[in-house]
Amino acid sequence: MKPFCFADGSIIDSQTATIHPMDLGLIRGYGIFDFFRTVDYQPLFLEDYLDRFIASAEKTHLPLPLSREELRSVIFELIEKNDLQQGGFRMVLSGGVSDNHFSPADGKLFIFAESLDFPAEEKYQNGIKLLTLEYVRPIAEIKTTNYTLPVWHSVNWKKLGAEDVLYHWNGWVSESSRSNFFIVKNGIIHTPDQHILQGITRKQLLKIAQNAIIRPISLEEVWDADEAFISSTTKVLLPVTQIDERKIGNGKVGPVTQTILGKFRELEKVTVS
């Protein structure tokens, strides 16, 4: 965490930021957040992230104490004060201190600046392993702070050689715990359309791919895919070469995945130039 954050209506020392112990964010796990990156001191795709954060606040009945313009202003001030050339921003809106300890109240807004480390280069070169998990994330279209199941489940990942999970339900896949999911078949990209967060990186990759198909995808189709990958703000695009004990395609990073990742890297340069 960087030295300065936004809390209690102003920019303060990050070490002094506090939250009430009876806040619904703590006692009920109720709150929202969003996370984006800075590249050369510029917030990448900022307006898209603000769109999603503001929409999440409305859908969860949590009043935002700042307007869109005020949020943007605070973010740029924090970039300057923290000298955040390359890093991340975490916006958090808690559930608030409720009279009945259950209903949403006036939450507390935090904006933190953070260092950001990407996955090791070998993961982009060799791909990663996912574990299937039968689960549908609650109100998946909202980026809530409720990650209880994957945090609990993650204790097993390292010993099983996995990076993350792939959610599925009744034979249909949706997303990873912190990423969107894609498969490639016969050179065409396909991505699920149900029970997912509308990822900002996903949105950009779909623009790049142009001919991608958004539709329900079965677990059987995943086993038969030529390639697979996940996307997120902090990973960009990670190739998936194994799910459970099955190889995806030939078990190597595929050409479509490599091409899309390369094009996204070029898009980053153009966006912040």
Image (cartoon, grey):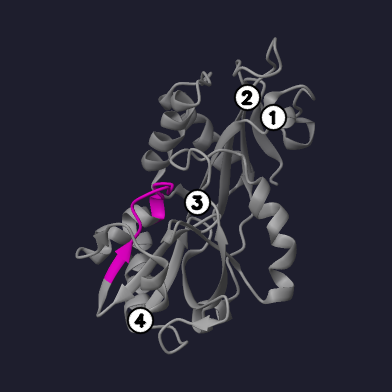
Closer to us: 39 or 150: 150
Q: Residue 28 carries which label?
A: 1
Residue appearing at x 56%, y 77% in the figure: 123
112 left or right of 126 in image: right
* Upstream in sequence: badge 2 or badge 4: 2
Query: Residue 257's x, y, as percent?
Result: 37, 76
Q: What element carries label 2?
A: loop
Which residue ends up furthest to the top in the rendered image? 99
- Residue density around tag 4, few if under 14, some if 14–19, many if 20 or more, within 10 Å: many
- Foreground mark, 3 or 2, reads 2
Q: What element carries label 3?
A: strand
**Circles 2 and 1: CB atoms closer than 8 Å:** yes
Q: Which mark is residue 95?
A: 2
Closer to us: 80 or 170: 170
Per the image, the residue denoted by label 4 is 226
Which residue ends up furthest to the front in the rendered image? 170
Query: Residue 138's x, y, as percent?
Result: 53, 40
Per the image, the residue denoted by label 3 is 38
- Residue density around tag 1, few if under 14, some if 14–19, many if 20 or more, within 10 Å: some
* Upstream in sequence: badge 3 or badge 2: 3
Q: What element carries label 1?
A: loop
The type of residue carrying mark 2 is: Gly
